[in-house]
Image (cartoon, rainbow, N blue to C red):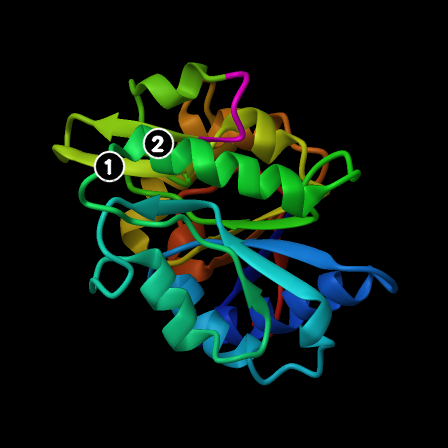
Amino acid sequence: MNVIVLPTPDALATYAAGYVAEEIRRYETGRVNVGLAGGSTPKAMYQHLADADLEWDRIDVWLSDERWVPADHEDSNANLARTHLDAPAAFHFPTFDNESHPHAAAAAHSDQLRELIGDSPGPHIILLGIGDDAHTASLFPGTDALEHDGEAYVANWVESKQVWRLTATIPLLHAADHLIFLVSGSEKATALAAILEGDEPLPAKSVADGAKKVTWLIDEAAAMQLTTTKLTRLFA
């Protein structure tokens, strides 16, 4: 596990874009698939990533989770990604249909992801965030999706928010070559400390602990409650 600390949210967004671009370049041939995260921290990073010198015509992007809303809705992660990652990558997102059930959309997208991943053992790079309740993707504490071990992508009812979410499952996340968490802000500090230094099986901790490779890119505000984690501070 590597935990890299940047001094400010802006520095985090800029550094993260360069870091992700370099990880993509490691795949020298063939197509590269990248799971995108929603939220304000990834949004700022995508704007920098779009300017990176990458072979965008061989990059496939998808969403580590999505809200059950139309693609043009302000809460849609697809809308966020399309708006802020203004680059000619191939976008592969769940399809919203208000006449169908979220389970049907999740199953269809699960099939799409299997086709996208192809013969690879799993996804290449997946970007994730955390919530102040230590959820990641749309794997919220106490929800059914935490127990799924067969499907790549499932619909998850989140009782605390009274909403449906679509999310990558823990097995799919664990199959990725590299998970990259982006965490910014003091409101995430307690959750981050519990994930990295606590014993409770929180969703983000369960995901990170089983990953092949995991990197945490965080800012100083998010790091303020960490006491035992080895940190690499940049640009201090």
Q: Residue at x 25, y 44 (%)?
A: 68
Circle 1 SS class:
loop
Q: Quadrant of residue 41?
A: bottom left
**Residues at circles 2 and 1 in contact by the CB criterion of under 8 Å:** yes
Q: Quadrant of residue 208?
A: top right
Magenta span: chief secondary structure? loop
Residue 130 as seen in the image, left or right of residue 128: left
27 lies above or below 99: below
Query: For the magenta stretch, what is the residue range?
Result: 149-153
Tell me how far mark 2 sits from mark 1, CA to CA: 7 Å
Q: Amino acid under label 2?
A: Ala
- Look at the image and tell me whether residue 76 can be seen: yes
Is residue 117 in the magenta section?
no
Q: Residue at x 35, y 47 (%)?
A: 66
Determine the residue located farthest toward the right in the rendered image: 29
Q: Nearer the viewer, residue 115 or 74?
A: 115
Label placed on residue 100: 1
Q: Quadrant of residue 22?
A: bottom right
Q: At which x and y percent is residue 229? A: 58, 39
Rendered-image quadrant of the C terminus: bottom right
Circle 2 SS class:
helix
Q: Residue at x 69, y 43 (%)?
A: 117
Q: Residue at x 72, y 68 (%)?
A: 58
Q: At which x and y percent is residue 4? A: 60, 56
Q: Nearer the viewer, residue 209 or 58?
A: 58
Q: Nearer the viewer, residue 20 or 190?
A: 20
Q: Amino acid under label 1?
A: Ser
Q: Residues within 10 Å of mark 1 (few under 14, many from 20)?
A: few
Q: Dot 2 corresponds to which residue?
A: 104
Q: At which x and y percent is residue 166? A: 35, 38
